[in-house]
Image (cartoon, rainbow, N blue to C red):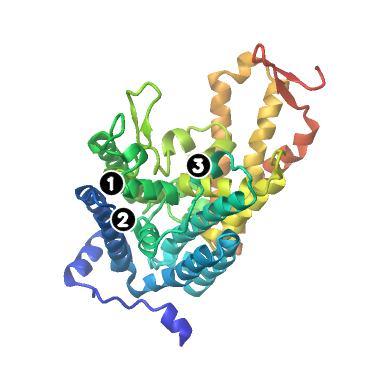
Amino acid sequence: KFQMFMSTRHNYIGVMPWEQAAAGAIGLSIDQLRFTLALFSSVLIGLGIRLFKSPAARHLYSLSTGFFLVYYPFGFGVIHALPPSALVYLALVLAPGSCGTASWLICFPYLIYLHVVNASGEAWQAGQMDFTGCEMVLVLKLISLAVARQDHYVATRKKRELSGYAADHAVSSSPSPLHFLSYVFGLGNLLAGPYVEYVDYDSFINLKGVWSPSAAKPMPSAALPSMWCMAQALGFMVAYQLLIPHWNRSVPFTPWFDNSSYAVKLGATFLMTLTLQLKFCFAWKVSETSLILAGLGFEGWSEDGKVPKWGRVENVRYLTGVLLCDSARLVPGNWNIGTGNFLRRYVYERLTPRGRKAGFPQLLATQLVSAIWHGLYPGYLMMFVASALWINSSTVIFKGEQVLLPAVLRDSLPWRGVKIAFQLLTLQYLATSFIMLDLHDSLRVWASLHYVPVIVLLLLCLAGPLIPGVKRSRSTGDTATKKEQ
């Protein structure tokens, strides 16, 4: 009975005839239609917060509208926000010195429970949607807040200075219940992310820092950046709708695919994965539009004070940062940027011993955390473990080209094109397991290309220690091997 209660899909906003008609006309499930409508509605709701200047009113507006945007598509499923939020808040208030550690022990097990109970990956493939996706964003919010609070508390008690990112985002006191819930549900941000650090959200609500009306140079109009962002979102949506009938997860199981050449199969996996990525890009760009219109996306001005910066909530730079990127190590900073930032700041860097450089063990551990965060499916595990090899291989390639290639070749456009093709085709091949989820299906797709990309990555990583290190000259900027020096 408890499990039935916790996984109920009851919703006081019943399905209306026009929703059924609209869903049938555009080929979406009711869950998908309501999620899409809530996502687009968040744009107007984001704009609406500008009507309020009082911090209390802004908190109440952000909380109430955010809760409604999540309740509309997921109904009583929103109750899943309660257990981890309540427990983390108690830890913030009662045990600030260990609330960060407690948040990890609270949030991740509960998220895993939801993934298992709701069979999230299979449900999403079938067009069913539940609160699990929102819970994934919530986990990032709760852990980042609790760890930032613990950082400040411990540093103050032990008179230890924080540095860098931790110092900029440390939380000096536990938020009030209103401020906490406003952060949790704020403006429907749970729908598609990205997570925002609590100190940034709090400054935005209280109109401080770059959002202050009395700032030397106040925030400019968000009309142009929001329109450009929405135009990108609509472009991604149209491209997805055009491609999905032809390049979906069933392609690798067709006779056409089985009888195709190696090059055609590689191209097919590329297009199949690209199509899935377009769906994510659409959702992220609509969410970004909402937060830009609200003002939360504003970062300040360029150093010369002439160009406003709106990248605080940017979650993807697909063309330049993924499709045209020539280094695997740079892609995580351009795809699902919010989650990548969380993994870097709260996993990767914190697993690295102070004063030492992070290595492959820290990278692999970070990717494993990402896999578990996505769900307990073999396909996710395959994708993220292999992606650790993929990211590490980019370092090997950099070292190798510095040692083996003349500057005129390694800086040439053709060589950059080769690197772009290698990193992109390899990424899309690995990501097929993200789509398949099932172990047998994932291995079948990988085997259709004889595991060549995985074998190449393994060979590159094994060759890495054999390549002399590269040291950059301070005076000229030229590179030389350690052996030469």
Q: Nearer the viewer, mark 1 or mark 3?
A: 3
Q: Amino acid at mark 2?
A: Leu
In the depicted view, which residue is nearer to us: 65 or 416? Answer: 65
In the depicted view, which residue is nearer to us: 447 or 55? Answer: 55
In the image, residue 114 lies at what x, y percent? 49, 71
Q: Is residue 371 above or below residue 286?
A: below
Give yes or no for contact between labels 3 and 2 (Cβ–Cβ under 8 Å): no
Q: Tell me the CA gap for discs 2 and 1.
A: 9 Å
| Residue at 38% in and 54% down | 192
Question: Where is residue 108, by image quadrant?
Answer: bottom right
Label 1 or label 3, whichever comes before in sequence order: 3
Question: Where is residue 233, by image quadrant?
Answer: top left
In the image, residue 228 lies at what x, y percent? 28, 37
Pointer 2 residue: 187
Q: Amino acid at mark 3?
A: Asp
Q: Is residue 381 above or below residue 132?
A: above
Pointer 1 residue: 294
From where the camera sits, is residue 142 visible? yes
Pointer 3 residue: 168
Q: Horizontally, is 341 left or right of 80 in the view?
A: right
